[in-house]
Image: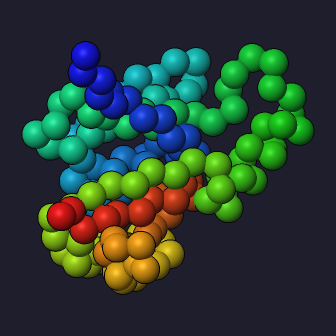
């Protein structure tokens, strides 16, 4: 039996800003851009990897969420403690420079971690934490 990751989900608070980050800065393909009832869902993914995608969705739109809960979720997203994702690149320094040049929010410059990984970290426009590892 073979199991793979097909979709990962991260919230966005501004679809156009999310596109600017994931498509323009990271270079991901836009696989789907769906609007419904004034909201927008984006599906993006790395070029050459059609089986793996990230769905960027409007946060806290589930029925039954109170206004107070919605506000808490938005605050957690903005702090970077709601959604997170780790990516990998064969050229960490080039990706770092590309994201810096795009104006992305740097959390950590590339560094060797004590647990054996070289990585850096950014926040996307919504505040989600993205770590990028140097692929081995």
Residue at image position (41%, 73%) is 115
**Image height of 99 relative to 10, above or below:** below
Residue 102 seen from this side: no
Residue 90: quadrant of the picture: bottom left
Position of the C terminus, as image quadrant, is: bottom left
State left or right for residue 10 relative to residue 96. Answer: right
Residue at image position (52%, 18%) is 36
State left or right for residue 106 relative to residue 112. Answer: right
**Image height of 129 relative to 9, above or below:** below
State left or right for residue 84 relative to residue 131. Answer: right
**Nearer-the-camera pick, 134 or 14:** 134
**Image height of 42 relative to 46, above or below:** above
Q: Residue 135 placed where, x, y %?
A: 21, 62
Position of the N terminus, as image quadrant, is: top left
Q: Residue 37 placed where, x, y %?
A: 58, 18
Residue at image position (72%, 53%) is 76
Q: Residue 103 placed where, x, y %?
A: 39, 73
């Amino acid at each position: 039996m073979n199991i793979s990751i097909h979709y990962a989900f991260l919230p966005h608070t501004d679809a156009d800003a999310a596109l600017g980050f994931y498509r323009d800065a990271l270079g991901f393909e836009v696989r789907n851009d769906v609007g419904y009832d004034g909201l927008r869902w984006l599906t993006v993914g790395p070029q050459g990897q059609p089986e793996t995608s990230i769905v960027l969705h409007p946060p806290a739109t589930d029925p039954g969420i109170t206004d107070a809960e919605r506000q808490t979720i938005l605050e957690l997203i903005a702090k970077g403690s709601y959604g997170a994702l780790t990516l990998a690149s064969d050229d960490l320094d080039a990706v770092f420079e590309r994201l810096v040049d795009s104006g992305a929010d740097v959390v950590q410059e590339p560094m060797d971690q004590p647990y054996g990984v070289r990585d850096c970290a950014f926040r996307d426009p919504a505040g989600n934490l993205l770590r990028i590892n140097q692929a081995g």
